[in-house]
Image (spheres, rainbow, N blue to C red):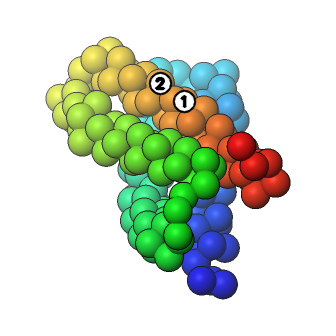
Amino acid sequence: MSMIIPLHLFAAIIWIGGMFFSLFILRPACIENLEGPFRIKLMRGVMERFFKVVWILVITLATSGYFVVSQMDGLPWHVKMMLIFGNTMFAIFLFAYFVPFRQFNTELLAGNNAAAAKKLDFVRKLILTNFVLGAMLSMGGALGRFVAL
C-alpha cells in the first residue's frame, strides 16, 4: 500500500498536467505560430503520443485505485467522489480515443483538413472536460483527507 498511493498520485499528476499543457500552452502557441495544415499535423503527432501515455496512466490509475478501494472498510465521501469522477474521466477518454480521434485521423489521411480540424476541436473539448473533472477530483481527494463530511 505504501507504493500504491504515490504511484496513483503520480499517474494522476502526469495525466492532468498533460491535459493542462496541451490545452493552455501547446494549443495557443500552435495557433499563434503555425498555419492550419502544419498545426493539424503537429497536433496529430502530439495526440498520438499523448494518448499512448494516457493508456498507461488509465490502466495504472484504475488498477491502483480499485486496489486501494478493495482494501478499505467503507468508503469516505472523497473516495466515492474519486470513483465517480475517475470512472467518468475513463469513459470520456475511451470515447475521445475511439470515436473523434479515430475520425480525425481518417479525415486527415483523406486530405479533408476542415473536417479533421472539427474532429480535433471535439477532442480538445473532451480533454477540457476531463481536465476540469481531474482538477475537481484532485481537490476533492486532497480535501477529503482533512475535511470529514
Please tell me which residue is depicted at 63% across the width and 73% down the height of the picture: 5
Residue position for label 1: 128
**Quadrant assignment, res 149:** top right
Q: Quadrant of the N terminus?
A: bottom right
Q: Is residue 69 in sight in this rendering?
A: yes
The answer to whether mark 1 and mark 2 are in CB contact below 8 A is: yes
Q: Position of residue 98 (x, y in %)?
A: 24, 42
Q: Position of residue 88 (x, y in %)?
A: 41, 40
Q: Position of residue 145 (x, y in %)?
A: 76, 57
Q: Is residue 42 in sight in this rendering?
A: no
Badge 1: residue crowd in 10 Å (few <14, some 14–19, many ≥20) = some
Seen in the image, is 96 located left or right of residue 12? Answer: left
Query: Residue farthest to the right?
Result: 146
- Disc 2 secondary structure class: helix
Please tell me which residue is depicted at 56% across the width and 36% down the height of the picture: 133
**Quadrant assignment, res 113:** top left
> What amino acid type is highlighted by mark number 1?
Leu
Q: Which residue is more in the foreground, 8 or 48? A: 8
Badge 2: residue crowd in 10 Å (few <14, some 14–19, many ≥20) = some
**Badge number at residue 12:** none
Please tell me which residue is depicted at 54% across the width and 58% down the height of the picture: 75
Q: Which residue is more in the foreground, 119 or 14? A: 14
Q: Which residue is more in the foreground, 39 or 16? A: 16
> What amino acid type is highlighted by mark number 2?
Lys
Q: Position of residue 91 (x, y in %)?
A: 34, 42
Residue position for label 2: 125
- Disc 1 secondary structure class: helix
Seen in the image, is 16 located left or right of residue 54? Answer: right
